[in-house]
Image (tube, rainbow, N blue to C red):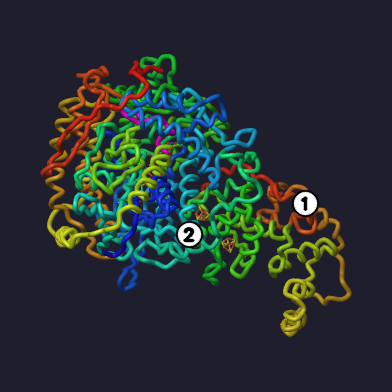
Amino acid sequence: MDAKHDVLVIGAGCAGMRAAIEAFDAGADVAIISKIHPVRSHSGAAEGGINAALGNASEDDPEKHAFDTVKGSDYLGDQDAIEILCDEAPDDVYQLENWGAVFSRTDDGKIAQRPFGAAGEPRTAYAADITGHVLLQVLYEQLMKRDILVYDEWFAWKLVVDEDRCQGVIAWDLMNGGLKTVGAKTVILATGGAGRLYVGTTNAYACTGDGMTMALRAGVALKDMEMMQFHPTTLSPTGVLITEGCRGEGAYLLNSEGDRFLKRYAPNAMELASRDVISRAEQTEIDEGRGVDGSVLLDLRHLGAEKIIERLHGTRELAMTFALIDPIHDPIPVRPGAHYHMGGVDTDVWGKTSLEGLYAAGEVACVSVHGANRLGGNALMETITFGKRAGRHAAEWALANTTVTVPEGAVSDAERELRELLDRDEGERPWRIRDELATTMHENFGVFRREEQMQRQGEIVSRLRERYERVVVEDKGNVFNSDLTQALELGFLLELAECMVVSGLARKESRGAHARPYDYPERDDDNYMRHTLVTWEDGRPQLDWRDVTMTKWQPQERKY
Amino acid sequence: MPSEPTAAAASTNGALSPTMDVAVKIWRVDPETGERALKTYEVEAPEWVTLLDVLDIIKDRVDGTLAYRKSCRMMICGSCGMRMDGAAVLACKTRMADIVAAGHVPVISPMGNLPIVKDLVVDMGPFWSKMRAMKPWLQPGYEEPPEGKEYHVSQERMNVIHKEALCINCGCCVSECNSMESDPDFLGPAALAKGMRFVGDARDGADVERLEEYNSEHGIWDCTRCYFCNERCPKGVDPRDAIAKLGAESIKHGIDRDMGAKHAKWFVKSAETTGWLRETELVPKTQGVVSSIMQIKFAMGLARRGKVPPPFPPHVAADVKEARALRDIVQQQGREGALGHVQGERALSYIEHHTTAGNRHAPEITPGEEPVNRDVGERP
Ligand SMILES: Cc1cc2nc3c(=O)[nH]c(=O)nc-3n(C[C@H](O)[C@H](O)[C@H](O)COP(=O)(O)OP(=O)(O)OC[C@H]3O[C@@H](n4cnc5c(N)ncnc54)[C@H](O)[C@@H]3O)c2cc1C
Ligand code: SF4
Ligand code: SF4
Ligand code: FES
């Protein structure tokens, strides 16, 4: 064992850092492992804001927030967890502000709040268009203040399980090379999402679902994996997010015929309809041949140069840099892109998994507060509130239990597996498998799901997994071997894809992000007010179900 | 080169973007031996690619051992700082079409002023330890937030630190910092901008202690004002301006023991009274009498060669009124005023004019406007 701690957090985005701070304040010896420096985490890319019923912009209360979230989740969210999130959110946001978060302000100097999709009140607290960045910075500041140890640029690869307890992590040290073993009484997974399963995604290169697969391999179930949210306006071809602010300012969505096609899908709300409605409308247009190179067009031109420069400067810069298009003169090609994974590691409301000593929080986890569809602004809030709760519980448990053992076998097995990979010289480099996975997931498990396409995708993923068995890492060196870590990431992604397909096939209804208009167009509350749970047995996914927890709210039709 | 389209090009659901042939030269650095080699790579890439995309294509198809950092590919995570033709850029912000069209083959190398680890990867350790030295966390001070709630601070007051809060810790400024090149211990632009982020924060109570620290050796006055940091920052943080603001705040709080502060003060005094910069007085006023006596020989040498005017009799510029009028403009309009003529040097506007320490609840920093992200203009 190279080191030992009470609590070891894997991942240093908003969830991981918030968990570490809480565990530290509870008196535990805590450390963080992160494959990229904490401030490089993808939480920093969040622009819009964070939801809490502060009531600074209107009369609001946590109950309204909870109702919006339950309804938004298409009734797949667990209502006990949602109530906790909404009740604790205001204090958690005040805490961030007191630590120094640079929030935007109301006229009377309070935290400003803006309206956001499907929220009954303006409750999204924000910091201009850099909310995630500001939160990441303030959490890192608090980390420095407490002098919390970060194993920076260590790539966590395997969980150590001994005597049915998670007792640590085996990681690859990117800077120096070599496997390192860190023992811990409790381990918190906070590794974020898995958007890299898709070729068009708003997610960073680091979002490869590592923690989900690590948990899966340790015998923990993944919940609601079919629920991947697509964002309707991601820039073609890179997938960089184009803010909803554009539509808020009055931008049009056009098809190849120059038609504002939303009049046929959402005649009242038009461009301001909810994310899933617009994503589906766009995909229908594209599928029916009215797209432009696999995209539709976001037209800002009628807003005029002045407004574009003044109000949508960031968007213009993104379009000019990444698509070589100036929205003053040309419409921006956009399409639905994978944005947020509602599914993830199955946890309870304290972030606890079924494996003793293992916790999960943030996008990697599925508590579940987002159910089948996440509301904008709720993901950041979840990282904070459930990061905090996981940190506290993990610390308390660790302080009450003393021993940590890492069996020799675990380390030597990992060493052997790694050697085998690095010693292989004949075979395929990973990138082609990675690209095929991402393109086919987009085609066959995207905005719409068809039975036969999902089945085909299952076969494709199996074949890709076979090819992955013979993958070759070209870089054999020790120092900053990103060729190796990228190969390991691909391994994580492949198993997740398989879990998603299995869950998707099993859910024979349309709910939230899981849209099956061709065979099961309706929501089926009698049979599917249930979470899918996938575990890994003998190299294959196994499916199970669990009923949704309800407290106050009976399902209604979800209409806006 | 593989002839099939790149995955990126194929990613628009089958439709192919037009491609181009891109060539770059990359300084490869072997981590074990430290050996360096400039290698040329040529790949086919879609027209919209950035430098980061090109590196990805090279790593996938040509040489898997190429090392560089990346994550967000949208100019927010700060991973991908490197040099192109000798100037720091974010690889993901640098689009290649214009460079290729100009027929240019850029040279890519790791950032400057930081130890090289491998290829384009530098050791950010020194960057972070300087950041840490700023004690970059809010130290609650003047007011308590209302019971269990947020501090009340106006948006205007928040805007003071808006630019500094944009910093993504990419290190591009540090890479180009002239002062750090000669003094590796200089705190440097990014850390000092972070310092300003707290000094300018109405909620922070440790501003005076902070200023004391930033005024010590390797601190704000060691900046050479070359403005390279402002020029290279991809996020419009303008670290040099932050340093100037720290200087202004220091002088306002009477922290002017540093030569740099004295120098700045005397500069203004001199220009204001005679319209000239009186070099012979500048040295003793800045460095003190003893130190200047030691430099007399040097000064006499300069005088002999006509490089400095004799101190007596003091001669006043014919148009001293003009100098004073200029000072008044600075005083009235601050740094942002007068068409930005006095770029960055807000320090001057405080000297001798704002002698009262001011209300500590509301430091007299003029709220800045919301900055726009400036394109630093990649050079072909
Ligand atoms: C473009 C964009 C905009 C968004 N806007 C909003 C918004 O406005 N409001 C909102 O509420 N939500 C928004 N979201 C969603 C939200 O930002 C994310 O869900 C959330 O930030 C995830 O935080 P996290 O802490 O769980 O993970 P991340 O911030 O992704 O952090 C993951 C961490 O895990 C580490 N890690 C991963 N794998 C390993 C490994 N194998 N070993 C070691 N470390 C590892 C990484 O280094 C990183 O530190 C947005 C998302 C995107 C992509
Ligand atoms: S202006 Fe100062 S801080 Fe900025 S690069 Fe030049 S010497 Fe460095
Ligand atoms: S000030 Fe600018 S260049 Fe320097 S680290 Fe921050 S964002 Fe990068
Ligand atoms: S990859 Fe994140 S800033 Fe370039």
Of the numbered discs in the image, which one, if any, rests on residue B87? 2
Of the four image quadrants, the one with ligand 1 is top left
**Residue A155, image quadrant:** bottom left
Q: Is residue A210 left or right of residue A46?
A: left
Task: Give, as a three-letter code, the residue at label 2.
Answer: Ala
Query: Foreground residue, B280 or B161?
Result: B161
Position of residue A541 measured from the top left corner of the image (x, y, whole percent): 15, 38
Q: Relative to A550, is A206 above or below? A: below
Residue at image x 87%, y 76%? B312
Residue situated furthest right in the rendering:
B313
Helix, strand or loop at label 1? It is helix
Q: Chain of mark 1?
A: B
Task: Give, as a three-letter code, the residue at label 1.
Answer: Gln
Q: Quarter of the image for the C terminus of chain B: give it.
A: bottom left
Whether residue A375 is in magenta: the answer is yes
Which stretch did the figure color magenta? A370-380
Compare marks 1 and 2 and give the one earlier in the sequence.
Answer: 2
